[in-house]
Amino acid sequence: MNTATSHALFTRALELMPGGVNSPVRAFKSVGGEPFFAKRAEGAYLIDVDGNRYVDYIGSWGPMIAGHAHPKVLEAVERTMRDGLSFGVPNALEVEMAETVRKLVPSMQMMRMVNSGTEATLSAIRLARGATGRSRIVKFEGCYHGHGDSFLVKAGSGALTFGLPNSPGVPKGLADLTLTLPYNDFEAATKLFDEVGGEIAGLIVEPIVGNANCILPREGYLQHLRELCTKHGAILIFDEVMTGFRVALGGAQARYGVTPDLSTFGKIIGGGMPVGAYGGRADLMQQVAPAGPVYQAGTLSGNPVAMAAGLATLELIQAPGFHDRLEAATHVLCDGLEMAAREAGVAVTTTRSCAMFGLYFNNEPVETFAQAVASDSAAFNRFFHAMLRRGVYFAPSAFEAGFLSSAHGETELAHTIAAAREAFREVAAG
Ligand code: PMP
């Protein structure tokens, strides 16, 4: 595989950007080797600057659920941008977006558009604190909610990948206000709320933990969190940046039938453009400026071109049977991967939720963060490179969920499983 052009670009990039990248996990640091540079993307494929093609299971870390460069999304962007890139006054697409989101996720009675998942979560936490007059927040080990100061405490994703769950630069006084819990542990949550429930402004959770690979909630767990928050007057925030519009049209809250007070979105809502959103109960959102005193703003928030890309994507995913087909494809993929691993004598287990999956080098089903981190990441790293050489791109970290899109058809799935058969044999050979 020729990677000369990527290598030359990475050499230049290393002098210009920390680690040569604009977001840490892209650097391949934990899996070893060097990243490839994308030239373009189409459907289920990424094509690099040296002309190599990869079946892509990241989809730009989530947004590309309808496949890369979908003609309908591109057409909406092209049409909208001809009228100007940004206005700084309200535009009709913002209203259309809010109406669409509320139709698909009814708990989003009112909302604000922002420019990233990070902005959405830190705005939601500020609102929880402002609305309750309390300071403490609760998050879960291995959950990642963007790089806001309050969230870089036992964080997942890149922070976990690089062994930096607690970042220097976060004032201790602020970090002390973030309490952490083990995900899927009913009793630990009850105990914490019994002790300090009256001081907790809000609890934020990835309803499915996609930043410690992919951990599904135990039966009744999200309901338990709902009840604790209600009982103690704390705001329940579902961070659906990853799960939103992906695990069901209405997100994890629809899939599990639990209604949060606030939700955060990103990724799919922007269709590949920089978009996030937070929202929920109208009485809470009415406290955001200028309706209320909790401040939050954004020069480019609700950007028309970004709204157009997001709306076109949300239109595509409303096609009848869209998520059912994705779910079926994920089962084919995960069953195939498990079977290929078994044939090679490699211990692998998968988790799945519609268009999202986890692959663990572990011989027991993974339900907790402790089990997730106990998986064999050295084996994962070998598997990652063996797949990459065969033109299949999984996330370059053992702690990231995989994503399918509607462009992943039989051809791509068959290619992936055939590649995995060989890759697992390489892993078994050590
Ligand atoms: N929350 C979750 C659940 C995420 O997965 C991410 C990013 N992967 C974020 C928040 C942060 O979003 P962004 O990278 O757009 O700031």
Image (cartoon, rainbow, N blue to C red):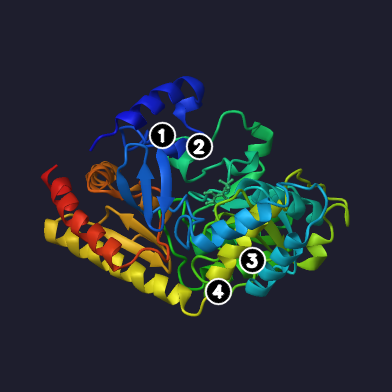
Q: Nearer the viewer, mark 3 or mark 1?
A: 1
Relative side of 71 to 265, left or right: left
Per the model, the C-alpha gap separating discs 3 and 1 is 40 Å
- Image quadrant occupied by the C terminus: top left
Residue 12 place in picture, x, y as percent: 43, 22
Ranked by sequence position, the earlier of labels 3 and 1 is 1
Q: Which residue is mark 1?
A: 27
CB under 8 Å between discs 4 and 2: no
Sequence-wise, the earlier of marks 4 and 2 is: 2
Which circle's residue, 3 or 2, is located before the other in the chain? 2
Eye-nearest disc, 4 or 3: 4
Q: Nearer the viewer, residue 35 or 279?
A: 35
Q: Which type of secondary structure does the marked residue at label 4 adopt?
A: loop
- SS type, badge 1: helix
Ligand 1 has an atom within 8 Å of the beta carbon of the residue at disc 1? no
Q: Amino acid at mark 2?
A: Ser
For disc 2, does the CB lie below 8 Å from ligand 1? yes
Residue in view at x 32 percent, y 37 percent: 50
- In space, the residues marked 1 and 2 are separated at their CA atoms by 8 Å
Of pointers 4 and 3, the one earlier in the residue sequence:
3
Q: Quadrant of the N terminus?
A: top left
Q: From the Cβ of disc 4, is ligand 1 less than 8 Å away?
A: no
State if disc 1 and disc 3 touch (CB < 8 Å): no
Q: Secondary structure at mark 3?
A: helix
Whether residue 354 can be seen here: yes
x and y percentages locating residue 46 in the rendered image? 38, 48
Give residue 42's quadrant in the image.
bottom left
Cβ atoms at labels 3 and 2 below 8 Å apart: no
Marks 1 and 4, how far apart at CA: 35 Å
How many numbered marks are there? 4
Mark drawn on residue 228: 3
* Residue assigned mark 4: 318
